Amino acid sequence: MRKIERDANMTDTKITARGVNVYYGDTHAIKDVNIEITDKTVTAFIGPSGCGKSTFLRCLNRMNDTIDICRVTGEIRIDDQDINHKSVDPVQLRAQVGMVFQKPNPFPKSIYDNIAYGPRIHGLAKSKVELDEIVEKSLRRGAIWDEVKDRLDEPGTGLSGGQQQRLCIARAIATEPEVLLMDEPCSALDPIATAQVEELIDELHRDYSVVIVTHSMQQAARVSQKTAFFHLGNLVEFNDTSEIFTNPTDTRTESYITGRIG
Ligand SMILES: Nc1ncnc2c1ncn2[C@@H]1O[C@H](COP(=O)(O)OP(=O)(O)OP(=O)(O)O)[C@@H](O)[C@H]1O
């Protein structure tokens, strides 16, 4: 039953970007990008350093709003909502479109409060019992519950790097997002912690659209179903991951995946 639902969902578009340009002052960092990101799918953004992967990722939850010199034009819709419309509250949007960063960044609070913070400010729990349930459920989905359940009042910063990253993923999940953005989530982790986070990503895409920026082509090949290749601010090619890696249509993609550029 679950599988049928998932396959049906995999054809649904979750995010549509049309004519997106991003400028940092005079630097034109993203050039007329058009893309449709499928629901319940892992989409990887790959490309050489500085090609605009992180910049475009940050467009999807308006994190670029926080950078003074940054200007975004064009249209981005999540379902039917124009996320840049003046009626959209960016704080609310970022609960709906959660983000996990390169370096794990737990709050200097207890493990419990790291998870409870978002649900509290968004009023998602009516009682302490409900909040406890959200915390447990989020930590379970973050695949870290068993490791922390007996020390929820200890600081999140006391966990290992890989545990901290899974805590941050659990924190992003706690506000019931529809989309999870991950900006090189494993780059600060060792191979074992990386494997655990990759396994978690595979689990999470059954329920969320996951968009991951990665420098590792091996990682993109392991975790994603769709891959977008960026080069000098252009979205050069977007296709099924297997096609991108075995049968790219653009010579720039081919050069990148064969190690000739980047
Ligand atoms: N805050 C900023 N201020 C000014 N320019 C920026 C800023 N962030 C990114 N840029 C510029 O925008 C372009 C795209 O950068 P971005 O970080 O999005 O690329 P990337 O592909 O994610 O790179 P990397 O893989 O190295 O992280 C680069 O030319 C970069 O110098």
Image (cartoon, rainbow, N blue to C red):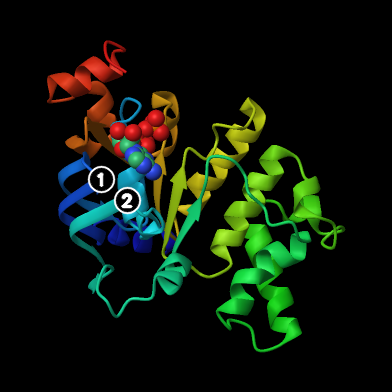
Q: In the rendered image, is residue 63 in sight?
A: yes
Of 157 and 242, the residue lying toward us? 157
Query: Circle 1 sits on which residue?
Result: 25
Q: Is mark 2 within 8 Å of ligand 1?
A: yes
Q: Earlier in the sequence, mark 1 or mark 2?
A: 1
Whether 127 is drawn above or below 120: the answer is below
Query: Circle 2 sits on which residue?
Result: 69
Q: Quadrant of residue 142?
A: bottom right
Q: Quadrant of residue 152?
A: bottom right
- Residue at 36% over, 55% down: 68
Q: Position of residue 29 (x, y in %)?
A: 24, 39
- Residue at 25% over, 45% down: 25
Q: Secondary structure at mark 2?
A: loop
Q: In the rendered image, is residue 45 in sight?
A: no
Q: Quadrant of the N terminus?
A: bottom left
The local crowd at label 1, few if under 14, some if 14 to 19, many if 20 or more residues have their Cα within 10 Å, is few
Q: Position of residue 211 (x, y in %)?
A: 38, 48
